Image (spheres, grey):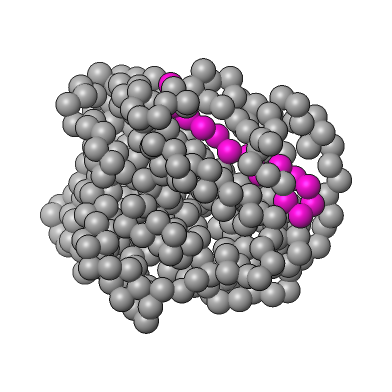
């Protein structure tokens, strides 16, 4: 029986935490885990279980959120799920499931999930329309024991629960998620249509793990291409093409969540792994989340294209990472202005010398963008190298590293 947040919140935050580190770092579809222990990222990698509990208490205040536990971990920590909708009991709404942080060190997957939650709980017309037609289920931290123990991949038993869906004895975290999938896909009139497994890869790329027709079906690969390309269209240059990472070319494996989905539900569920960037250039989680939600809505038939968005303003100042990056010869720089004011955007070389002023003017509030062609203020082509984009506006100062390849 699912446990309500208000009944066990106090109990959970008083659980004692055991500190140890995993020595087993197996290969994985995310790539070899380049684990480095340092003082800033030790144990919970900057976002722990207490942080999640704090956020849950905030999210639970929304009238569109139900917070429940779908089960418990080896160390008896609750595995929390958010259900977001204006009618979570509907038997006609479209249903989507997202789970993140199975591998604790891939914390970027949480930040994307966090921005998806922010998008869905906002007062925007898009969010209102999505909540009126769809039910989102989101597990922001599937492996809280691993997060707290500092295990890059495993749960408290030292077992990789991402690739343990075919084990003879399933781990409790796998059982909890698997049972939830069954509850929301078996005999109910509106089963899960999309199931996203959120990770982050050391290739420093954003991409979806595409499943070859040998391991799925020819029709499903067409569906995959449309799904991935649709999301990509909302963030040009942000995601790799659908065929960047091709898996299952030798048949269907049986150890992953997506394997479970395919073997049990086939083409009825678009079950894919998403890999965010896991490197110094990671970021733009809001742009990523926005693209995923919009592309996902297109796929399940929720039309957001007719909604007027011109008057929507960002909540805060933000200079986004340019894309593409590295680039040649053009790159696009997005930035947010929550209010009118004077804005200056310039480019510095690696020694801090200003080489180009891209913008220096009063601007109205909104979502903005500007391009740079890798030239200085005199129209001269700049050499390949690292450059810094500097934005100042109403006391806000931010920089982003850009890599020019001539």
Q: Is residue 113 magenta?
A: no
Quarter holding the N terminus is top right
Q: Residue at x 21, y 24 (%)?
A: 307
Which of these two is toward me, 205 or 308?
A: 308
Looking at the rendered structure, the number of numbered marks drawn on it comes to 0
The percent position of residue 286, horizontal first and vertical second, equals 40, 40
Picture quadrant where residue 205 is located:
bottom left
Residue at 81% of width from left, 62% of height from top? 20
Query: Is residue 27 among the parts visible in the rendering?
Result: yes
350 lies left or right of 236: right
Q: Quadrant of the C terminus?
A: bottom left
Q: Tell me: 262 left or right of 370.
A: right
Q: Residue at x 72, y 46 (%)?
A: 72
Front residue (pair 210, 191): 191
Question: Is 80 placed left or right of 136 in the picture?
Answer: right
Residue in front for this viewpoint, 406 or 17: 17
Range covered by the magenta-colored residues: 73-86
Please name whichever residue, 335 or 77, is drawn nearer the observer in this view of the structure.
Answer: 77
Q: Is residue 289 left or right of residue 368?
A: right
Q: Which residue is the extreme one toward the front?
A: 187
Q: Is residue 242 above or below residue 93?
A: below
Magenta region includes residue 77: yes
Q: For residue 169, which quarter of the picture?
A: bottom right
Residue 146: quadrant of the picture? bottom right
User: Furthest-bottom residue in view?
Assistant: 250
Residue 358: x and y, percent?
A: 23, 42
- Return the x and y of residue 200 as percentages of the image width and height: 48, 59
Regarding residue 147, the answer to whether it shows in the image is: no
Q: Is residue 273 above or below residue 80?
A: below
What residue appears at the point 70 percent right and 33 percent down from the top-left corner?
3
- Percent x, y for residue 175? 64, 54
């Amino acid at each position: 029986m699912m446990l309500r947040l208000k009944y066990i919140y106090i109990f959970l935050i008083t659980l004692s935490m055991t500190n140890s580190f995993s020595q087993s770092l197996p290969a994985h579809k995310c790539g070899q885990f380049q684990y480095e222990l340092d003082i800033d990222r030790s144990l919970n990698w900057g976002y722990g279980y207490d942080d999640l509990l704090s956020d849950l208490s905030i999210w639970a205040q929304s009238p569109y959120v139900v917070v429940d536990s779908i089960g418990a971990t080896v160390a008896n920590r609750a595995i929390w799920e958010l259900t977001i909708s204006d009618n979570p009991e509907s038997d006609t709404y479209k249903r989507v499931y997202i789970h993140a942080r199975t591998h604790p060190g891939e914390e970027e997957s949480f930040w994307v999930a966090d921005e998806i939650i922010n998008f869905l709980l906002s007062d925007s017309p898009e969010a209102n329309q999505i909540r009126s037609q769809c039910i989102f289920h989101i597990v922001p931290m599937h492996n809280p024991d691993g997060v707290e123990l500092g295990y890059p991949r495993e749960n408290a038993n030292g077992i990789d629960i991402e690739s343990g869906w075919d084990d003879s004895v399933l781990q409790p975290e796998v059982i909890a998620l698997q049972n939830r999938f069954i509850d929301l896909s078996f005999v109910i009139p509106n089963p899960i249509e999309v199931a996203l497994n959120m990770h982050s890869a050391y290739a420093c790329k954003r991409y979806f793990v595409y499943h070859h027709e040998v391991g799925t079906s020819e029709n499903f690969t067409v569906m995959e291409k449309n799904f991935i390309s649709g999301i990509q269209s909302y963030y040009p240059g942000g995601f790799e093409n659908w065929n960047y990472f091709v898996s299952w070319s030798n048949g269907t494996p049986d150890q992953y969540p997506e394997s479970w989905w395919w073997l049990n539900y086939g083409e009825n569920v678009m079950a894919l792994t998403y890999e965010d960037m896991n490197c110094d250039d990671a970021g733009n989680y809001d742009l990523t989340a926005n693209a995923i939600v919009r592309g996902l809505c297109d796929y399940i038939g929720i039309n957001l294209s007719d909604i007027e968005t011109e008057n929507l303003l960002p909540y805060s100042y933000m200079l986004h990472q340019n894309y593409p990056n590295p680039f040649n010869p053009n790159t696009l720089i997005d930035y947010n202005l929550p209010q009118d004011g004077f804005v200056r955007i310039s480019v510095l070389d690696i020694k801090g010398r200003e080489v180009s002023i891209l913008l220096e003017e009063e601007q109205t509030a909104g979502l903005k963008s500007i391009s740079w062609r890798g030239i200085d203020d005199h129209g001269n082509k700049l050499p390949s190298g690292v450059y810094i984009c500097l934005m100042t506006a109403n006391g806000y100062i931010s920089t982003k590293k850009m890599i020019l390849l001539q």
